[in-house]
Structures are given as structure tokens and as C-alpha cells.
Image (tube, helix red, strand yellow):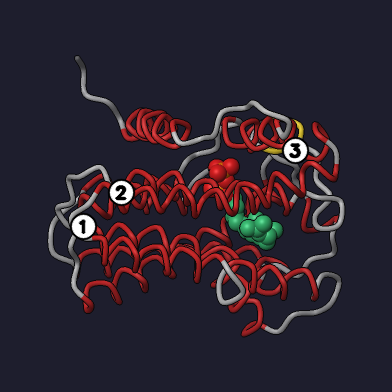
Amino acid sequence: MRNMNFKEMFSARTEEVGIVVESYLPSVEGYQSTVLAAMDYSVRAGGKRLRPMLMEETYRLFGGRGKEIQPFMAAIEMIHTSSLIHDDLPCMDNDTLRRGLPTAWVKFGYDMAVLAGDGLLIYSMETAAKALSMTDRPDLVARCMGILAQKTGIFGMIGGQTVDVELAGKPIPKEKLDFIYRLKTGALLEASMMIGAILGGGDETQLKLVEKMASCLGKAFQIQDDILDLTSSEEVLGKSVLSDEKNHKTTYVTLEGMKKAKQDVEIMSEEAISCLHELPGKNEFLEALIRMLVNREK
Ligand code: GRG
């Protein structure tokens, strides 16, 4: 078989990771099947599966070879998907297209979309707990469950989204925008890579470095997301574009201008790569993945 280029390798990994994630979804049955169908629809709609992919690649970087990472891979994608469902709601960004399909609230109604987001969010914890019976280090699994909850909650993604929503339509000083990006987007990337590092056997110093690497990546990733919202199309992204403008949001681009936004994406991604180089082990795919994420077109 001929050698695959990075794009092909990335697509293959997206598919492999997707199979793991989907294998943890609950069956769509019973009196509550409508909400289960909305959860199932939103996760199976696809997406790049970046967070579980980064988690598994970090786990491998530290030499992890077991299966206890898999419930966490599914859990982080469930949390991410739940956040997309809620982010698209009429009371938030009011968007109608996600992952190339009608958003959950358009397809299942506002009420069911709220419940599907809630359902996925808490099912993620039930899923992560499955790793307890797949390991001889339940202490590490318990720690990872704590990190998963913390980085998702009010001191993580939900906290960042709160400030983002509250300040829509208002000018935002740079420090507050940095706070929003670090929490709203960075926190789940931090959880992904930290869980990979902990279960892979990383020590405390390495864990701090992994957190910093993911935080730089998160900031670069969100700035790139702002850029794409302005410069790309619904066909390419599979989601609504010009959403920030519609919601009168201050973004990195409106604050700093397109040129600086692009430069800062480069700077933050190089910083993430230099953290990676300080860590032991080598994972060329992970390095290429970080570079590709911040230069992505969708
Ligand atoms: C119910 C858990 C819960 C949360 C409510 C709505 C909310 C709080 C948070 C929203 C956070 C959010 C949507 C941040 C933006 C992050 C971002 C850039 C998402 C796009 O991620 P990709 O490109 O998407 O990885 P795919 O579809 O490829 O997975």
C-alpha cells in the first residue's frame, strides 16, 4: 500500500476514533427514546473528533497502550457535542447548521435539544466511570474524572461560555477575551491532553507542560475558528458562518485585526510545539496534528 499523506492519515484517525466514541453511545430505545435519538444524531453527525484524538495521541506519547483511555475518549466527545448542541440554541448563537446537518434544536425542537445536551453531558460521566473496571490504577482514573468535570464546569468551559454570552454585543478588553478563549475552548483541550498524559503515566512536571501545550493550542484553535467564521463557507465548514457578526460578538479578529490574528495563531502553535519538544517520547503524528489544527480550513 502506498504511503498516506497527512490529510489521509487524519481522516483515517477521525474514522477510527469515531468508531470508539460511537461504541459508547446508549441505545435509542424506551420511553425516553426521543432524547436518546437527539443525542445519537448529534454525536454521529461527525466532526473531526479532535479532542479524543488528541487524548489518545498524548496517551501514546507517554507510552500508554491499554483500553482504559477509550471511555474517556468517548466522554470528552460527548461533552464537546453537548456544548455544540447548547451553543447552537436560539438563546445562545441561534444557529441552524452543524456538522453538515440541521442543528439539534432545528431537528428535534428546542426542548429536546436542551435535554439532549444535558443528557450527553451527564452520560459522559457515566461513560468515563467505566474505565474504573478496566484498569489496575483506579486512583488515576478517579483523578481523570475530576479533571474532566472541572475543565467542563464553571471553572472551565461553562465558565468561559458564561462570560462570552454575557458580553455579547459589548466591547471586551483583551484580558477578558483571553479568559473566555482559555476557558470556553482551551479547557476541554487541556482536559483531553492531561487525561492522556495521566493515564499514559506522565509525572506532575510533565502534566504542567501538557496543560500549557493544550492551552496554547486552545487559544490558537479558537482564533482560527474566529478567522474561519469570517473567511470560510457553510459548505466547507458544515456549520453556520458569520455567526459572530450576527451575534455582535467581539472576537480576536475584531479586536486585533486579521493580520495580527493570523500571526498570533502561528506564535501560539509554535509555543505548543515547543512544549511538545520538551516532553519525553516522540509522536510525529501529534506534532503534525497540532500544526494542521491551527492551519485548518474547517
Ligand atoms: C451543556 C456542557 C454544556 C455546555 C454549555 C454552550 C456552552 C456551555 C459552551 C460552548 C463552548 C463552545 C461551543 C466553544 C467553541 C469551541 C469550538 C471552537 C468548537 C468547534 O470545535 P471543532 O472544530 O468541531 O472541533 P467539530 O464539529 O469538528 O467537532
Calculate the distance from the C-alpha at mark 3 to the C-alpha at mark 1: 35 Å
Q: Amino acid at mark 3?
A: Ala
Against 186, residue 69 (above or below) is: above
Q: Is residue 90 left or right of residue 236?
A: right
Figure label count: 3
Question: Helix or strand or loop: what does disc 3 sit on?
Answer: helix
156 up-or-down from 132: above or below: below
Read off the residue under disc 1. 200
Asked whether residue 219 appears in the rendered view, the answer is: no
**Percent coordinates x, y for residue 237 in the rendering:** 64, 38
Quarter of image, ligand 1: bottom right
Disc number lying in front (2 or 3): 2
Q: Amino acid at mark 2?
A: Ile
Whether 216 is drawn above or below 66: the answer is below
The quarter holding residue 41 reads top right
Tell me if residue 39 comes above or below residue 281 in the rendering: above
Q: Circle 2 — which element? A: helix
In the picture provided, is 108 more to the left or to the right than 21? right
Of residue 275 and residue 109, the one placed in the foreground of this image is 109
| First in residue order: circle 2 vs circle 3 | 2
Position of residue 29 in the picture relative to residue 210 (left or right): right
Residue 141 in view in this figure:
yes
Mark 2: few/some/many CA within 10 Å (<14, 14-19, 20+)? many
Q: Position of residue 262 (x, y in %)?
A: 54, 62
Q: Mark 2 = which residue?
A: 69
Residue bearing the label numbered 3: 104
